[in-house]
Image (cartoon, coloured by chain):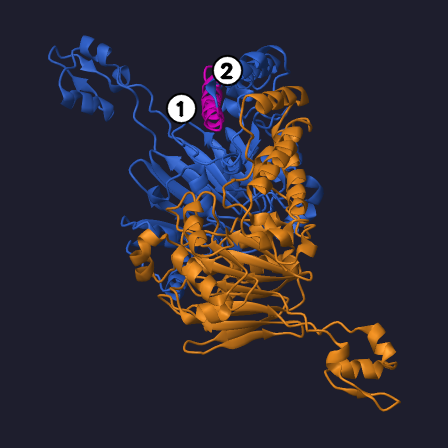
Chain colours: A blue, B orange
Amino acid sequence: MIIVPLGVASATPTATRHLSSVALWREGDIHLFDCGENAQMRMLQAGLKRSKIENIFISHFDVDHYSGLIGLLSTLQLQRRDKPLHIAGPKGIKKFVDWNLKFANVDLNFDIRYTEVDEGFESERVVDEDEYYVEARPLNHTKFCIGYRFQEKDKPGKVDAEKAEKMGITEDAQFKALKAGEDVEVEDGTVVKSYEIVGHPRPGDSFAYITDTKYCPNSVKLAMNTNILYHEATFSESLADKAAETGHSTSIDAARVANEAQTKLLVISHFSARYTNPFVLLREARAKFFPAWLATELRPIYTDPAQEKGIVKQKVYIKEIDESKSQGSRSGGRGRGSDDNKKRFRKRRSSSSGSSSSRGRSSDRPRRPRRDDNQERRKRRSDSNSSGRDSNKDYNNSGSSRPPKHITPRTPFDDFDRF
Amino acid sequence: MIIVPLGVASATPTATRHLSSVALWREGDIHLFDCGENAQMRMLQAGLKRSKIENIFISHFDVDHYSGLIGLLSTLQLQRRDKPLHIAGPKGIKKFVDWNLKFANVDLNFDIRYTEVDEGFESERVVDEDEYYVEARPLNHTKFCIGYRFQEKDKPGKVDAEKAEKMGITEDAQFKALKAGEDVEVEDGTVVKSYEIVGHPRPGDSFAYITDTKYCPNSVKLAMNTNILYHEATFSESLADKAAETGHSTSIDAARVANEAQTKLLVISHFSARYTNPFVLLREARAKFFPAWLATELRPIYTDPAQEKGIVKQKVYIKEIDESKSQGSRSGGRGRGSDDNKKRFRKRRSSSSGSSSSRGRSSDRPRRPRRDDNQERRKRRSDSNSSGRDSNKDYNNSGSSRPPKHITPRTPFDDFDRF
């Protein structure tokens, strides 16, 4: 499962932050949570195929959370989409889409299935597939607002084939039975217990999207034991009363939910435009909950390291949009990038002592995404690179003379790559 | 008058092109032509104050031409705008805005004045101020579509005060009369003719916005003798039939309008997503009409050289959005940027021989905007550059081994700075 924040602004965009939208990539399908203005373009820039969208979940009817929906739909129409689309949201979403499409005189050639939840509902599965379901619960905002939890269903435990054969299991039927948890009697009459052969069921991946709400119990219920909690943190603690008044969360509230829900990673988003540097928010959240991270637009968050080879390929890096024009050699950072990272990684590992659980979990992984990132970067770099030769030269220099360069923002907070 | 293209894509955005929208800056006021998705954010990035918007003109009801409107309005609302706003467009624009604001439950605390034109109208002044008016005419698209012409009213001719006094004109009343074109009789009985004192009226600046239409006479009428004709060129001539079928123009059509209307500068825009490099369109247009230029997002087009000092300052460069995150020292690249520019500039000057008129006009100017650009670029480059030392090295290499670097796309077509 890969989470790609498409917009992290609140209410009104800043020059650098787009309006709320998050894409969840899973097994080639894309599930969109909220659809702020220009979400369709951000998907393009993130390298996410809009044709792969399966579900769109709208949290509530503040303009900044759905203003990109009609544009996206008409683009899907232009792309000649024919497979149906599912849109879930508060009651009225259908009316909104229908009215606006009618106004623009667009006659979709694909079906839209709507799931509308009405005010005062307790909780509801708006999607229930074989492999995953999406649960919705009401939040506590100035207007009716919904939080979502995307939950993969548990996969059955692994079967120990060798042991099974030793114990005389041969037919598929028997394996099936064992998988289903039943015990099987083999020829010689001995009974093979399911748990002897079948391992623990593997828990499914999970993601909670909670935005535009004060702290409320439902947030915790939605986020309970998730791998990723994507929570709004519009204000810092200093503006707690403003948050209360406008029905938003402070970074502290977000951390509180994360703590009570025992989530594995907290990602805060939906930053008020007044914070040119949202790290102030992260600092507060980190003080209360670890690990926490900032949602960075177009920067994917991987929950399953097996996928960290990067199925999500970013086609256009905002940077490149400009750089494609200037063909200067971008070699410098290369070696720098990688070896500096290793360095920093070691530093981080050694320095890291407390909270061993999460560290234990990831101890064997972290390098992978990092490497992978580098490859990405190298590609980018070599793209904008005029001659391989001098780039190599550069690369050699870099190792020796210069101080390590930072390619992505580096701060004491950046342990992003662990996840 | 300054024209800032905010989006130059057609139908669906590409990774680098936003949906149609153009801002016209005049005397501190901003007039928006079409309002594609994310126009509000592009304005921010272009350094255009959204609070300064006086008029919004919608050409027609294809989603890509108005999908940013509601978002913009709700942002104005959040900015606590109180001065009224004027929106002109095809009949139904009021219904659209009202319905969507009602749906989002937004109660604007500023008034919107609507001018709705209905199908089958001949031509209409949708705005008529003391200093300028905006004329609308129907175009020829698959659905009802309107083209606009923004026309400054002529300023009265200059009064030759000396001559006037020689001829015995003393009182203000007399000057007023003369300015108004009346003749005045002075004490000694001689009649002073107005034309003797008052010079030619000075023609006002003009801009025509013509998008989503086949070639049609109304386009020419709107564009007649404009300083800038902003015309769509969705397709190249090779796709003329597709253009006809979808009710769009080819670059040739755009040039044709420019020729028949005797406009001073043709700017083509609204490029189909299939053209990753719109210069192919420009080449075609240039072959038929000169000077023509491509609309480049966030790149201002000045009609009055006196304003080329750049009242419109671009706050955020797309590149910086990425780089603001990487904290590198500010030094490198600089030299490169500038001197390479000088080089290139010299080259261009010398190579330029024909069409002396326009060159004469601008001979003293072009450096100004270019310098301006350079400073900006320097900033950008130095951002991207983390250590002064190596960047200088880099620069030396580049000077010797490599050909001068291009910072903006440079082609024989690029004589943008003349205007």
Depth check, mark 1 against mark 2: the one in front is 2
Chain name for mark 2: A
Q: Looking at the image, is A331 positioned above or below residue A120?
A: above
- Sequence-first disc among 1 and 2: 1
Q: Amino acid at mark 1?
A: Lys
- Determine the residue positioned at 45% across, 18% down: A365
Dominant secondary structure of the residues highlighted in magenta in the image:
helix
Q: Residue at x 41, y 76 (%)?
A: B119
Q: Quadrant of residue B211?
A: bottom left
B392 is within the stretch colored magenta = no
Q: Which residue is depicted at the point 40% across and 70% down? A: B144
* Residue under numbered circle 2: A392
Local secondary structure at mark 1: loop
Q: What is the number of the mark on residue A309?
A: 1
Could you classify mark 2 by the number of other residues whose Cα lies within 10 Å: few (under 14), some (14-19), or many (20 or more)?
some
Q: Chain of mark 1?
A: A
Q: Which residues are magenta?
A: A363-386
In the image, B226: left or right of A238?
left
